[in-house]
């Protein structure tokens, strides 16, 4: 399927099946904002949990925090965001539309005019006020990244948990950027989820950890189902490095419009800790009791977007094939990302069958994310579960009442096996255990 057709199909499927809805649609929508429906909320949670498991749970030297979304202007002054977190904004004098200068090559995408204003810096942070009076003394900002919350809490976390570099502080959460030209579905929005980790390391290990985290993060996407030919690593050229970066590599995905960033791995050096130490007067150094020396750790930062990752996983998983002479749409999502792991499908609404299906659902629901569907023919229900990516379907039929067994169907192969009701949980768990999942590589 051509890439643009696949994109259109995913956007349609996302809305029809409850993954992603245009926000405030009944009021005509609100530009570039989206609500995540029942299936989207489940999948987002699974992406977050897959990241947290890989980055924090599997590692003895990474911990997590949840820092505030509203934050002091002093943080953003120290970090350089107040002065330098800008995009070049131009207006089209003919149609009045506004664009990022670096994305339009001197021609208005709306009307084709080249009569554009001079570029001016536009700060991307959302400004608000704290308290009853909207004046300069009450200005605050919605955070444009989660990173600074980890930097300003570095000494507190280090002392509270008695951590010694190298160690990481991880965080999942909302960030907000007043993008001039958001677009491409959920690729670029003004409100988004980030998954970031700041890894504090002795200076002499910074380069090794930069390579280590680049490989670890690339393999995370690969293991969860994105093919190698749809991913690439792109080092930043010196003239595009962020003000804080000593080196950055982007993990890029081949979206329908071309390669775009999924995640960046940056060597931030000592920029952030040094900036906050200077502006706050707080000692941000680490004292090493073994060497009796103080030093500012270097920081390696893997930072990605949850919603971008979800979008890439959906695009990679989308497929059409033929089953029984009929075309079907299927999302070949990793079982660790699919909204539902298993769907329980009673063959009939008759009470005796419904009771057996309820019992099967109850036995599975404590271990897996489960759907329950009793409407339409069993073939239609299989197709519906294929389309939303459910790896397994469990069919409860009239034979179940006699042999106490059910039929388990595999999404990808469509093969079916008959299994005793009491063995379904074990069978599904064994199938999941045999499925590749991201596993942390020890640093050697």
Image (cartoon, rainbow, N blue to C red):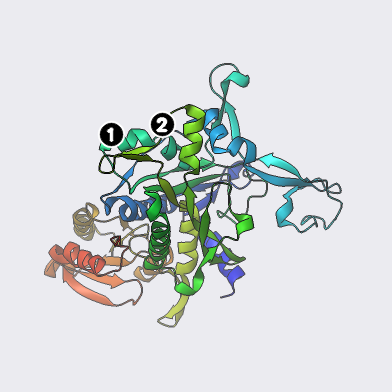
Q: Give the image quarter of residue 399.
A: bottom left
Task: Give the image location of residue 330, x and y in percent.
Answer: 43, 70
Residue at (26, 39) in percent of width and height: 289
Residue 357 shows in this picture:
yes
Residue 16 shows in this picture:
no
**Dot 1 lies on which element?**
helix
Residue marked by disc 2: 283
Residue marked by disc 1: 160
Residue at (42, 64) in percent of width and height: 218
Task: Give the image location of residue 77, x and y in percent.
Answer: 57, 32
Q: Characterize the local packing of mark 1: few (<14), some (14-19) or many (20 or more) Cα atoms within 10 angstroms.
A: few
Left or right: residue 205 compared with residue 398: right
Q: Which mark is residue 410?
A: none
Name the foreground residue: 217 vs 227: 217
Name the foreground residue: 173 vs 303: 303
**Dot 2 lies on which element?**
loop
Q: Is residue 157 above or below residue 258?
A: above
- In the current view of this chain or complex, which residue is farthest to the bottom? 325
Q: Give the image quarter of residue 334.
A: bottom left
- In the current view of this chain or complex, which residue is farthest to the front? 292
Q: Characterize the local packing of mark 2: few (<14), some (14-19) or many (20 or more) Cα atoms within 10 angstroms.
A: few
Mark with earlier residue (2, 1)? 1
Name the foreground residue: 432 vs 269: 269
Task: Give the image location of residue 384, x and y in percent.
Answer: 41, 65
Q: Are marks 2 and 1 in contact (CB under 8 Å)?
A: no
Left or right: residue 179 compared with residue 352: right
Q: Is residue 213 above or below residue 202?
A: below
Task: Give the image location of residue 100, x and y in percent.
Answer: 71, 50
């Amino acid at each position: 399927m051509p890439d643009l057709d696949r994109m259109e199909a995913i956007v349609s499927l996302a809305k029809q099946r409850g993954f992603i809805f245009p926000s405030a649609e009944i009021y005509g929508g609100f530009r570039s904002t989206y609500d995540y429906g029942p299936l989207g909320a489940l999948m987002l949670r699974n992406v977050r949990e897959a990241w947290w498991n890989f980055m924090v749970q599997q590692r003895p030297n990474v911990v997590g925090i949840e820092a505030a979304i509203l934050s002091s202007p002093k943080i953003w002054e120290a970090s350089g965001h107040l002065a330098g977190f800008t995009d070049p904004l131009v207006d089209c004098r003919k149609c009045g539309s506004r664009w990022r200068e670096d994305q339009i090559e001197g021609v208005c995408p709306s009307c084709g005019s080249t009569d554009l204003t001079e570029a001016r810096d536009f700060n991307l942070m959302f400004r608000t006020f704290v308290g009853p009076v909207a004046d300069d003394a009450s200005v605050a900002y919605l955070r444009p990244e989660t990173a600074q919350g980890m930097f300003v809490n570095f000494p507190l976390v280090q002392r509270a948990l008695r951590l010694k570099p190298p160690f990481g502080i991880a965080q999942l959460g909302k960030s907000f950027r007043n993008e001039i030209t958001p677009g491409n579905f959920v690729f670029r929005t003004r409100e988004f989820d980030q998954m970031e980790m700041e890894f504090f390391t002795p200076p002499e290990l910074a380069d090794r950890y930069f390579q280590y985290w680049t490989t670890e993060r690339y393999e995370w996407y690969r293991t969860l189902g994105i093919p190698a030919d749809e991913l690439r690593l792109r080092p930043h050229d010196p003239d595009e490095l962020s003000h804080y970066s000593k080196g950055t590599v982007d993990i890029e995905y081949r979206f329908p419009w071309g390669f775009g960033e999924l995640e960046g791995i940056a060597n931030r050096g000592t920029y952030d800790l040094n900036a906050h130490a200077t502006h706050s007067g707080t000692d941000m150094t680490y004292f090493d009791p073994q060497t009796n020396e103080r030093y500012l750790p270097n920081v390696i930062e893997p930072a990605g977007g949850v919603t971008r990752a979800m979008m890439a996983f959906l695009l990679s998983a989308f497929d059409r094939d033929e089953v029984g002479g009929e075309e079907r749409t299927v999302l070949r999502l990793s079982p660790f990302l699919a909204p539902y792991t298993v769907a329980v499908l009673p063959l009939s609404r008759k009470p005796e069958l419904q009771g057996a299906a309820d019992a099967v659902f109850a036995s599975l629901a404590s271990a897996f994310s489960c759907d329950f569907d009793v409407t339409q023919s069993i073939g239609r229900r299989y197709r519906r579960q294929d389309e939303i990516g459910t790896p397994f379907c469990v069919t409860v039929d009239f034979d179940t009442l006699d042999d106490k067994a059910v039929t388990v169907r595999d999404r990808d192969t469509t093969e079916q096996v008959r299994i005793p009701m009491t063995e379904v949980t074990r069978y599904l768990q064994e199938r999941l255990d045999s499925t590749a999942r991201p596993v942390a590589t020890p640093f050697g």
